[in-house]
Image: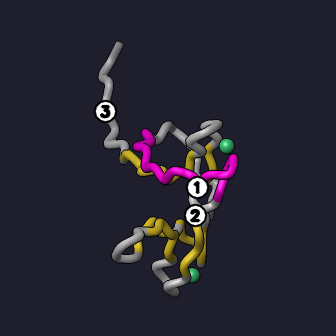
Amino acid sequence: MGEYMFRGTENKIKKILKCGVCSHELPVPEHHGNPMSWVLVGSFRKKELFKCKDCGYFMEIPLHCGLTMLYSEVEEEEEEEEDANA
Ligand SMILES: [Zn+2]
Ligand SMILES: [Zn+2]
């Protein structure tokens, strides 16, 4: 009963790495406290790398089960949660 107010929940984009073999998920690595950006570099053989937006540092995509993990972005609806980070 009563009014149901839809609170403007921001859908957060959660960036994850997923193993194509065993579906294991890992968070995207961070550098300087921010998740690194997924980039494609190279002209002929494109190579996936992670880049830090702050310092330009490049990092190889981690491997799992012997294969490069797949980068994916999933929309994550934020549930009511208290932000413990101050
Ligand atoms: Zn795996
Ligand atoms: Zn950095």
Q: Which mark is residue 6?
A: 3
Overall secondary structure of the magenta stretch? strand
Q: How busy is the neighbourhood of tag 2: few (under 14 within 10 Å), some, or many (20 plus)? A: some
Name the mark nearer the viewer: 2 or 1. Answer: 1
Marks 2 and 1, how far apart at CA: 6 Å
Asked whether the residues under the numbered discs 2 and 1 touch, taking CB atoms below 8 Å apart as contact, a structural biologist would say yes
**Residue 81 vertical placement versus 5 (above, below):** below
Name which residue type carries label 3.
Phe
Q: Earlier in the sequence, mark 2 or mark 3?
A: 3
Give the extent of the magenta segment.
63-77
Say which residue label 2 marks.
61
Q: Is residue 67 magenta?
A: yes
Q: Earlier in the sequence, mark 2 or mark 1?
A: 2
Marks 2 and 3, how far apart at CA: 39 Å
Write the residue at 65% across / 36% down: 22
Q: Earlier in the sequence, mark 1 or mark 3?
A: 3
Image-quarter location of ligand 2: bottom right
Name which residue type carries label 1.
Thr
Name which residue type carries label 2.
Ile
Marks 1 and 3, how far apart at CA: 40 Å
Say which residue label 1 marks.
68
Write the residue at 32% across / 42% down: 8
Name the mark nearer the viewer: 2 or 3. Answer: 2
* Helix, strand or loop for disc 2: loop
* Helix, strand or loop for disc 3: loop
**Residue 57 vertical placement versus 78 (above, below):** below
Where does the C terminus fall, quadrant-wise? Answer: bottom right
Image coordinates of residue 57 in percent, x first then y, are 55, 83
